[in-house]
Image (cartoon, rainbow, N blue to C red):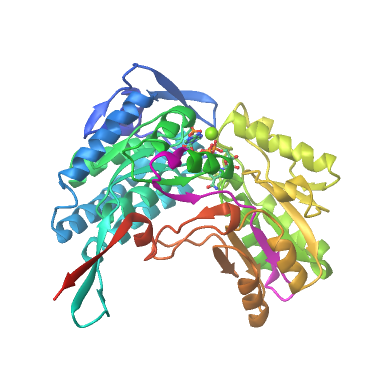
Amino acid sequence: MAQIEVLSEVSKFLEGSPKMTIGGKPTEAGSGKTFTVIDPSTAQVITEVPRAEMGDVDAAVASARAAFDDKRWSGLRPGKRTEVLYKLGELIKRNINELSQLESLDSGKPIKIASGEMWMAGEVFRYFSGWPTKMFGETNPTTDDQFVYTLREPVGVCGGIIPWNFPLIMAAWKIAPALAFGNTIVLKPAEQTPLTAMRLAELALEAGVPEGVINVVTGFGEEAGQALAQHHDVDKIAFTGSTEVGRKILHASEGNLKRVTLELGGKSPNIVFPDADMKRAAKGSMFGIFLNSGQICTAGSRILVERSIHDEFIESLVAATASMRLGPGMDDETGMGPVVSEQQMKRVTGYIDIGRSEGAEVVSGGNRAEELGDGYFVEPTIFAGVRNDMRIAQEEIFGPVAAVIPVDDVDHAIEVANNTIYGLAATVWTNDLSKAHRVARGVKAGTVWINSTGQYDPSTSFGGYKQSGFGRELGVHSMEAYTELKSVWVSL
Ligand code: NAP
Ligand code: MG
């Protein structure tokens, strides 16, 4: 064990009972209510944050509306907005130790991984800082007596609702493009992990983002989240989370027909062919499901293995998994931390029971790791002998549980890969170029990784097919999600 010491600025932040940021001011809930924040590694309360209700969301939306309407942000010179967003990226990086500790304590993530994530969140701001100067319109080829051009304009007030698996990265994915294209935003982080988003709102003010442009409200989905999704003065909602709540967001949005992008669940296939580099495939498949304790929307939770190498591959996968060290987030030797909450732990162990009762065989893990104390630790678990119609192969578990399913050949692999309501990502391990591209074309998924998994870059768009959602985030295509297009006709 190499337990990390908590930084004094982190203790100070937690002891000060963090506030929401509305209109640039530290803000408590109007009701004075709070809720507790728990460290999943210890099950101990680490702080309390405001519990926002409808009135608080109204105040945050009003502040974002005022900031949008008076153009205090969109009216700045594009080069100035670039400077501010770039600076915010830099401030994230400068405060990386503090932010990683907050993230690790809040979510249970291993500190080293949290640190990499904070860096990536900074990169998202750096990437989007380049966009304010690139919001080009077009001139259109119409008749000689007309001059037609298009204007790209911000959508207006955006609402961001995000999950607990990558708290600061998810906040960056919503805030950076919203601001890059001239919008203002109200962000509601997940109730389990509000802290880094709250700190980000402070850093944004320090970077020079005008007051009211970024507002962060903390609270529960059914209260604050619902109030934001149905708010008539919110022009767009960007949601990441479960498919079930995605449906609710869509319903809540119908009142004013706000724009909606949904980034939802997955049950992503990870396909291994006999001609793959086996060592690399086993290690990659292991990380693909167990990184972040399996709490990744793109987790390769269905491992499809060609029958001829099935037993041999399972052996390699189990061996690779044995190297994954389970432990508390704030230990710098930990490879895999706890799951995020008691509720999530019960859900995951419940699915392990379901897998057993469906007749699948546990070849690794299979239990809560009680020896690690009160934290929400679940052993990395591998099921063999899984059929694709079992619940553990069809339902998103969102925990460290892999289902290994044998397949016959490329066509069968594609068929099984697509036999799910989801379509977020797919991974394929093969050294056969044509097999790799046949799978890439054949799978219905927003992202395909060949001979690696879990790669992201702010330049590369991300999103789902089928019930994994719609719309694309990151990259050039995020412009569609955060702007309106206006056609202007001039008669000559
Ligand atoms: P979730 O319920 O979908 O939560 C995502 C966000 O939506 C949270 O901020 C949540 O607030 C909010 N929310 C919940 N109900 C809402 C409503 N009626 N209106 C507006 N906002 C609402 O996800 P979760 O509870 O964190 O996890 C449940 C399951 O979702 C997981 O087990 C996993 O299967 C899936 N999940 C998927 C992803 C993904 O990226 N694909 C990410 C996280 C979870 P609260 O925090 O208060 O609930
Ligand atoms: Mg929830």
Residue 469 included in the magenta stretch of the image: no
Q: Nearer the viewer, residue 425 or 140?
A: 140
The extreme top residue here reads: 32
The residue that appears at 75% across and 72% down in the rendered structure is: 411
Pick the quarter of the image with the N terminus.
top right
The residue that appears at 40% across and 31% down in the rendered structure is: 227
The extreme right residue here reads: 359
Q: Where is residue 34 shown, x and y percent of the image? A: 40, 20
Residue 268 included in the magenta stretch of the image: yes
Q: Is residue 415 above or below residue 300?
A: below
Q: Is residue 29 above or below residue 456?
A: above
Query: Does residue 324 appear to the left or right of 216 in the view shown?
Result: right
Query: Does residue 336 appear to the left or right of 77 in the view shown?
Result: right
Q: Nearer the viewer, residue 338 or 206?
A: 206
The residue that appears at 65% across and 77% down in the rendered structure is: 438
Q: Where is residue 4 shown, x and y percent of the image? A: 44, 37
Q: Nearer the viewer, residue 50 or 179?
A: 179
Q: Quadrant of residue 423?
A: bottom right
Q: Is residue 68 visible?
A: yes
Q: Is residue 206 above or below residue 374?
A: below
What's the magenta region?
Answer: 252-278
The residue that appears at 37% across and 61% down in the rendered structure is: 480
Q: How many marks?
A: 0
